[in-house]
Image: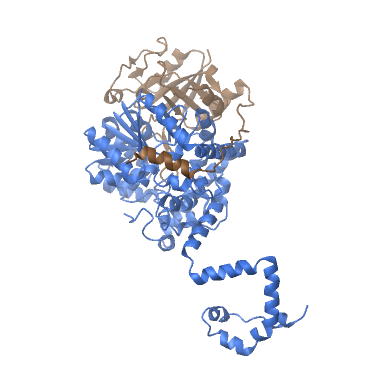
Chain colours: A blue, B brown
Amino acid sequence: MAKGYSGVSLPFPTLAKTALEDTQLRTNLARATTTIRNKRAKVVAEVGDWEALRQAGHDIKMESLSNLSTHLTQFEKEFTSAGGHVHWARNSQEACEIVARIAKENQVTSVVKVKSLTTDEINLNEYLGARGIEAKETDLAELIVQLADEHPSHILVPAIHKNRDQIRDLFVEKIAEAREGLSNNPRDLAMTARVHLRNRFLSARMAVSGANFAIAESGTLCVVESEGNGRMCLTLPEILVSVVGIEKILPKWTDLEVFLQLLPRSSTGERMNPYTSFWTGAGDGPSQRHVILLDNGRIQTLADENGREALACIRCSACMNVCPVYERTGGHSYNSVYPGPIGAIITPQLLGPGLAKTLPFASTLCGACYDVCPVKINIPKILVHLRANENRANASISEKLAMRAAAYALRPDGLKILARLIRATSPLLTSSAFTKLSKSLPVAKKWMAFRDIPRTRLNKKP
Amino acid sequence: MTSSRDDILKRIDQAKLGMKATSPSRSYETTSPLSHEELLDLLEDRIVDYKATFTRSNNVPATIAQLLSQYSLTTIVVPEGLPSDWVTGTIDHKLSSAELDGFDVVITSSEVAIAVTGTIILNHSRTDQGRRAISLVPDTHICVVSAKNVVGTVVEAVRRLNPLDHQTWISGPSATSDIELERVEGVHGPRNLHVVLDLS
């Protein structure tokens, strides 16, 4: 298992270097990202008002953030009055404790899980496991990753780094229900997962999910999925706990008319995902429904006026599918639940100063991510902002002085002064004595090892 | 000691100081320019694209009977409010998950269908559409969509629905693309979806 999944351990450049040497990984990734990029492009091109929808999506999210506390308390009121339970968690520890407490109170020793980045973010499975509660992933890709004892490498397709042969071998080794001579055909593999999980679904007493959207005005939660494992978990058990980041709030039910157009086309490249479930408080389904509203770094992200736009993310993964860096290094190099361009701006902000500090540099700033983002997050702009923060925090004194001098000199009048200075000193600077001397000066020698100060142009009068 | 709740709310208000609330631009389209006939064609195209079947019917009971025989479906579960002349089946009175697993097919009505995305919306608060569980556990779902309830766009559908109603939106049978992004229809949800468009 990758160590330090919290951005604490190895930096991106180190991990990326290893990943780049894995040719199988690069082949798997190139193939997968190309497929999904083309699918997305095709279904997005069908929508004549796509740009208007993007703008609306962006605006609704930003408006929601500008009034977040009101929306959250309204959600709490509505969800509670409809018979649900609302909990609040400042950090992963508090959120995990609440889930474990609910399990203990109900004598539950195993839970089924709907794919949820938020529960990955708080390391819920490990927390529950350490307390004797087994957390079983039920999304096919999450199941693959869990069986392999790895971490997801993509937010939508967590096992994107694995090909069909690798998955077949894994199933044969780890799944008792895998039949003799199992093929590498994706259908056969999916059917093996169906058989493996079927009884679990029918007998599970408690499920844990995330949510894609939480509607403030009605207290409604929404989960978007494909396989039906989500519906199984959200419907059949007695107890459901949904861990929801506070930024998932939308003010109004009708806001979904925008996001349910943007999300499926941007993420799986479908006109609509197979299944979307909605519930408000209790009723039809689990008799106990809980929601945990989670901060875990979101408020500190909100506090940065140049970085807060990252909270508009709806986790579609379009940005990583078009990113030339992601396509080559893969998700594990980012060492975060959130890899790719969005991960490079969200992870450092959620974790706070000093952590995941190499991630904002894991980009070419080509801007492809901004172009495809369904909620128009200006990812390159935030990357540059975070780089600047990082540089300010880490620059050495000489670097700071040099930068300040450069800033002064590069002003319009500063340039004139600089030009005059150079002209006045050029006989000295181009003299053979200075050239010889400069090759032993601390900083200058690196420069002068390969370059000479151009003699003729400096000496000539215009 | 302040509670997590109060602490979170207080810190949010400090964090967003100076952030202006602007009213979102909503210049997107709300309706479809297509005629109702064209919308029905579009719905068919989308649903078939998801690898579900689509049958236009002026006689729903006959069409259901035909589908049951064609796919050899014998054990049938229905929600209690399904029109009784459509089909004879076991009426769901809180059947357990294990009991539901013993049925070949579930037959339900539906609330709204969206042509442009091929989406059918089940409103579980209605007795002709039944609980979430009954349209989930059996391996085949026959879903009747009234032509009157077909709308063009996602926007029209959302505006018709009440968030307090428990809902499931269905676009084709369950599917996964988790292995090399190759789409496989039929995973944990019903592997077969047959849509009957009621023209009567």
Would you identify the image quadrant in which residue A112 lies? top left
Camera-nearest residue between B145 and B191: B145
Picture quarter containing residue B74? Answer: top left
Rendered-image quadrant of the N terminus of chain B:
top left
Which percent across, then down, holds residue B186?
40, 33
Q: Is residue B114 above or below residue A461?
A: above
Q: Residue at x 36, y 59 (%)?
A: A9
A216 left or right, relative to A42: left
Question: Residue A146 placed where, x, y %?
Answer: 32, 46
Residue A221 shows in the view: no
Q: Residue furthest front?
A: B1
Instruction: Determine whether A75 is above or below A7 in the image.
Output: above
Point out the residue furthest to the top here. Answer: B85
Task: Give coordinates of residue B161: x percent, y percent.
Answer: 49, 22
Where residue A305 appears, as percent x and y from the top left, is 53, 48
Side of B155 where A190 appears, left or right? left
Location of residue A437 with respect to B190 vertically, above or below:
below
Q: How many marks?
A: 0
Quadrant location of residue A295?
top left
Q: Is residue B145 in view from this perspective?
A: yes
Q: Outermost residue toward the right?
A: A462
| Residue that appears at 58% across and 88% down | A436
Residue at the spot 72% in from the left edge and 80% down from the top edge: A457
Asked whether A328 or A378 is in front, the reply is A378
